[in-house]
Image (cartoon, rainbow, N blue to C red):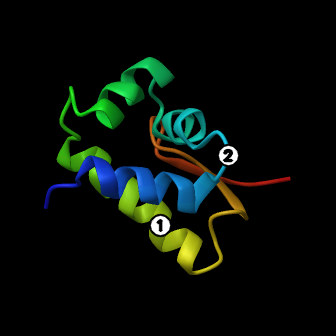
Amino acid sequence: MSMSVEELKSIGIFLFKYGWQTSLARHLGITPQHFRRYVSGKTKISESREKQIRMMVYLKKNGLFESFEIDFLTKTIHRSK
């Protein structure tokens, strides 16, 4: 399982539209600068990060993503206000 840069971009736009890089970085618990290394292809996306991103897609497709805020660093889910 290896996510390409093109796939990452299309997923980011699907999940967040405008400001997708910053939003996706925040949801992954990493800095926007670190995330941009993924987008540029300088850093390969780890398997665990890829699974986190794919879980977000699953939640979005099933209408659950907007209802919850996911903190992958603490592995907690909070209902959005």
Q: Which residue is mark 2?
A: 18
Q: Which mark is residue 38?
A: none
Q: Residue at x 64, y 39 (%)?
A: 19
Tell whether 77 sits left or right of 35: right
Closer to the camera, 41 or 65? 41
Q: Residue at x 54, y 48 (%)?
A: 76
Q: Of helix, strand and loop, which one carries label 2?
A: loop
Q: Position of residue 10 (x, y in %)?
A: 44, 58
Closer to the camera, 58 or 19? 19
Q: Which residue is mark 1?
A: 57
Disc 2 marks a residue whose amino acid type is Tyr
Tell whether 4 sits left or right of 19: left
Closer to the camera, 79 or 11? 11
Q: Of helix, strand and loop, which one carries label 1?
A: helix
Q: Is residue 20 above or below residue 37?
A: below
Q: Position of residue 60 (x, y in %)?
A: 57, 70
